[in-house]
Image (cartoon, rainbow, N blue to C red):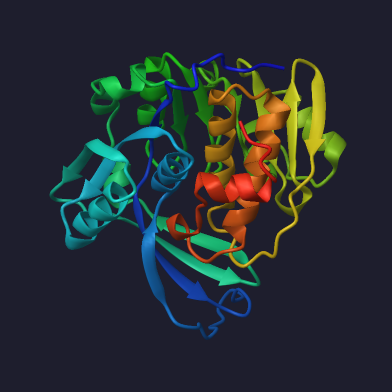
Amino acid sequence: MFATGVNPDSRRIAVVGSLNIDTFLPVERNPLPGESVLSGPVSRRAGGKGANQAVGCARLGHQVSMVGCLGGDPEGRWLRDRVLAEGVDLSAVATVAEAPTGAAFILVAQGESTIVISAGANGLLEASYVEAQPVIANADALLCQLEVPLGAVQAAVRAARGLVVLNPAPAQLLPRAILDDVDVLVPNRHELAAITGSEPTADLAGIIDCARSIKVRKAVVVTLGDQGALAVWEGNAVRIPAVPSVVVDATAAGDSFCAGLVDGLLRGMQLLQAAEWASSVAAITVSRHGAIDSLPFRHEVVALTAGDAP
């Protein structure tokens, strides 16, 4: 296994990714094709995988800078203020005057979320803009997702000098030019199948085989929902049990897991210990409504783990 060796007093994280306005619609069940269902009260909140992960890292005690795009609309101005209030540096988040801010429409049924995304300004993040942002090369860790163009992600991982963690969501095939520069890949089982061109499976042996077929620099950590996570590295495969929790809304579970994993690794944890810590972060997240609103602060995770923290 590995630890990053980063000094705990030097924890700078760059997040390259999306910022969205999330519209939540609570439903009893998801509609079938051609069917209408009634929703409970609609709520609009701050989100986007990039913003979720950035705020998650900030609430765990890190200095976080985001690289991305917001629209030149009232939603973009509101979202900028909301994320700034969490202590995230947004000086490298551009405003695209002619574009709307990204939007996500989220059906929440029995705690599980189904999400439709309209990229808006997120889809206009250019590789040349990403390459010009020094916060990436200066960071101890880079965290990326796939709600922005692949060219922007490729530029980010190429520019990074610290730990590189990629959450490949939404699921899609990834070029070797990206994977070659990734230290830790964090897919769920559906994203893992998309990357490997295989069918999704719940079979643990099949998941291990798929994870081993992906060549990244250090490890693949597959999130498995209420079954926990699976860490695969250097011929090893170990399942990390889920931390028990009452699931209210799983929208930002994967994002908070990624934030917790980066937090643990930057503070000197070995991979399995960091994944266990990340599972505790996610367990708190799913017990609350919303995306950014559900992310825990460091002292809450410490309390859940009875002080067993980096």
User: Would residue 135 appear left or right of 108 to someone viewing this image?
Assistant: left
In this view of the protein, can residue 152 be seen by the observer? yes
Report the number of discs.
0
**In the picture, residue 108 is in which quadrant?**
bottom right
Q: Which residue sits at x=41%, y=32%?
A: 150
Q: Tell me the quarter of the image containing the N terminus.
A: top right
Residue 36, horizontal then vertical, whole percent: 53, 83
254 or 204, which lies in front? Answer: 254
Instruction: Out of 281 and 153, give the one closest to the viewer.
Output: 281
| 77 relative to 57, above or below | below
Q: Is residue 261 above or below residue 268?
A: below
Quarter of the figure that contains the C terminus: top right
At 75% from the left and 15% from the top, the residue drawn is: 234
Q: Foreground residue, 306 or 161?
A: 306
Residue shown at the point (52%, 31%) measured from the top left: 166
> With 89 as the anchor, is 3 left or right in this view?
right
Which residue is outermost to the bottom?
38
In percent of width and height, residue 246 lies at 69, 65
Q: Quadrant of residue 228?
A: top right
Residue 53: percent from left, percent from top? 46, 43
Instruction: State the residue at coordinates (70%, 43%).
Output: 189
Q: Is residue 201 left or right of residue 158?
A: right
Decide if residue 40 is on the left or right side of residue 135: right
Residue 170 visible: no
